[in-house]
Amino acid sequence: MDDHATVISMLNHTWFGSDLAPETQERLAKLGVIQDFEADEVILHEGDEANEMGILISGQLALRTLVPERGPVTILSVEPGDIFGWSAVLSATQVQSTVVATEKSKALVIEGTKLRAALKEDHALAASLYPRVLIAVARRLRATRLQLLDLFAR
Amino acid sequence: MITTPAPSHAAAARQWFLARADLDALIAGLRDSGRRVIGPTIREDAIVYDEIQSAADLPAGWHDEQSAGRYRLERRTDEQVFGYTVGPTSWKRFTFPPNLPIASAHRTGSFGFEQPTPDAPPVAFVGVRACEIAALEIQDRVFLGGQFTDEDFRARRASAFIVAVQCTTSSGTCFCTSMGTGPEVHGGYDILMTEIDGGFVVHAGSPEGAAIVAKLPTRRPSHAEAGAAVDRVESVRTQMGEPLPMAGIDERLKLQLDHPRWAVVADRCVECGNCTMACPTCFCTSVVEKSDMEGKRSTTDRQWDSCFDVAFAKVAGGDFRSRPRDRYRQWLTHKFSTWFDQFGSSGCVGCGRCITWCPVAIDVREELGVIAPPIAPVIRPVAVEPVAASPGSYSIARVAAVRPETEDTSTLTLTDVDPAFLAGRPGQFVMIALPAFPAVPISISRFRANGIDLTIRAVGPTSTALTNLHPGAKVGLRGPLGTFWPVEEAYGRHAVVVAGGVGLSPLHGLVDALVANHDRFESVSLFYGSRTPEDQLFRDDLDTWSASKAIDVAITVDRAGPEWKGRVGVVTGLFDMISWDCTKVTAFVVGPERMMQASVQGLISKGVPADRICVSMERHMECGIGLCGHCQMAGRFVCKDGPVFRLNELGDLFNREGI
């Protein structure tokens, strides 16, 4: 079991976790577990059941999608402070992209079933967490729009 | 203002010589005129200002040895009366007393508040130095120069007769020459005295002063005596050495609010407040209420306070300056920076009291040098006159090397160029031509010792022909043309370069300049985004810059395969890495206009001022000199009014459709 104070201290260094109320940070620290990943380690597989959400503490991850005849294409890299596996906040869904550590990384990982149960029962947690997940998703949406514009195309 | 006495015939005519043995006549004359005389005298091993009865009370034959945190009196080898500099007290003690009743109140029978009438009997200050006159004048501006005035101060100042004394010695903590307040007295006195062998050269600066001098047993000074008086003061200037580089100190300090030295000096500071008490200009006070046991009568005393006091900025909900570093920063920045905003001058006169009387020997001169070092004078460059400055006219250059950058982009290194091209500025461009091909505008991507680089993407007939050239080929050049990156305006700020795709080309020379002068900037960063890793320009340079401590490089690509271990995402996503105060950022942005728009939005949302964001615009250019009309963007020709613009120059033209 991770020392909660250490986990909270790590959360405080992320945009996702730094402004959360102390009791919400405490709740997340109890729900999750700090995990270390080696470079090239696959954390989540595209298409698997979405049952883990993580907050990246350090390192860098790549979100990859398999494109037929092109192989895995990196869609986005995840920097410290950002989240991965956000689909886990929704029930009965699939991981949207494969998450791979591109370097040695550390993350607070929360099991999806526990997270969903906690969000259902703890409205304060839900009120804090959902907007942050939405911010993270909106940022990705904005970035994806710009990527779709293919600004540097010839 | 009265100018410095000089040994001219006219000045000599207004001067008198008073023998040292007759100095008591001056003190007696002042006392006979009904004035209480305050002057230097020795108390507890220091020369302080206090009431004196006669010249015998003055510190004749004593000198003060001063350095940071140290003050000692030593015997002089002569009997000079004013052969010391300044001690722990200053004249504000008498014009702005440490404790002053300012009001009383009662609720016995009636209810009311009373304000005492200023009580300022005539007084004479003897031995006032140049820096101290400057300090009195600073307090004049503080207390009398604004909408609200301090009438007690006004009365005390008006009643004070000033006998100024030129400094004929300096201590190790004096720096009046750096603050422009000394050593010469330049006015603000009734009588001015300069001590020389055997006596004083005396000058009256007011009718009241002349009336006192007229009663003294004086004679005209000899030419040698008048000259000696000037030489003595001049020798003090020499003793103090080179003045500190104080030009722009107010702005320099404002750029350093987050400097790590604040914490370092605060670790040494014991927050005794000595510096503020000894300072002749510090004016902060607090009020103390004193009441009888029943609370029916009370008096309000104003007392000197110090911004180093832990409670000075405290309010009910907390303390605005809770850390020692905050309090030290408040004091130093107020003295040397924000005082200018409030009162039009520095709050420091260079008397050195805060240095001498600091128990841990903190020296403001040293702290200023570390926290806000001088910035070398900025010489704003002007664009060199272009060569071949008419359409159809070209200067011939030779291709020395061709280096492929990406699948369709190459860099040509040109030599044998006209020297004007070597004197071009990052951001400028050339018109380059080949026989049978129309000229095209190409940014200068690098300035070399004997040539320039042009990075060219093969998108049309001319650019394709150019990228297919081999070493030895000749080309025609016109330029350098257009505006350039205002590098010097970013000195002291965070310089942020945002490049998209081939937009790194017109920024390469800028990055070279930023890296070469990195110590002039708060930080230097490059955010570079490209479509894929294969589309990156200048990969060797990116590696070199990434390994350099002079610049932080963050690279991202829009898409990549699994072999790419770097960041994937749009360049604006890199702005999340910015942790600085963005009001201190100067940004240089080049890329496709949509990318520049997204970048500019991202920078502005983080607080970067619009006039600190520079962009380089692209338009169809045929002549490059504002004659063909192709590149017009509303009222501007991008070729000669640009291509580099500040965002505020473009206003709503930036990224407007159809302009």
Image (tube, rainbow, N blue to C red):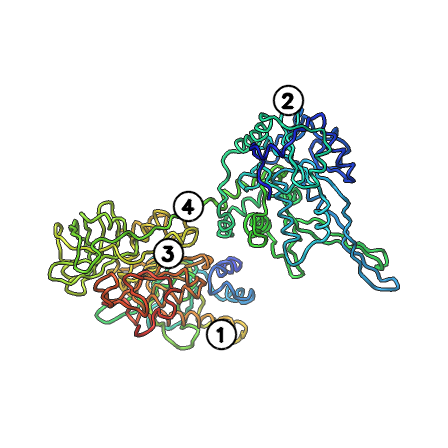
Q: Quadrant of residue A110?
A: bottom left
Dot 2 and dot 3 within a common chain: no
Chain under label 2? Answer: B
Q: Is residue A139 above or below residue B123?
A: below
Give the left or right position of residue B530, taking residue B179 as reference: left
Q: What distance separates the C-alpha of mark 1 from that of mark 3?
A: 31 Å
Tell me the residue at 31%/66% (across/down). Answer: B636
Q: What distance separates the C-alpha of mark 2 from that of mark 3?
A: 74 Å
Q: Nearer the viewer, residue B104 or B513?
A: B104
- The residue indicated by pointer 4 is B377
Q: What distance separates the C-alpha of mark 4 from that of mark 2?
A: 45 Å
The mark closer to the camera, 2 or 3, is 2
In the image, farthest residue toward the bottom: A92
- Numbered tag placed on residue B334 in the rendering: none
Tell me the residue at 32%/63% (across/down). Answer: B568
**Answer yes or no: do the residues labelled 1 and 3 have beta carbons within 8 Å?**
no
- The residue indicated by pointer 1 is A117
Mark 3 lies on a secondary structure that is: loop
Dot 4 and dot 2 within a common chain: yes
Q: What distance separates the C-alpha of mark 4 from that of mark 1?
A: 64 Å
In the image, farthest residue toward the left: B436
- The residue indicated by pointer 3 is A104
> Of label 4 and label 2, which has the lower sequence position?
2
Give the left or right position of residue B387, taking residue B613 as reference: left
CA neighbours of label 3 inside 10 A, class few (<14), some (14 to 19), many (20+): some
Q: Is residue B531 above or below residue B119?
A: below
Residue A116 location in percent, x, y? 47, 74
CA neighbours of label 2 inside 10 A, class few (<14), some (14 to 19), many (20+): few
Q: Identify the amino acid type marked 4.
A: Pro
In the image, farthest residue toward the top: B77
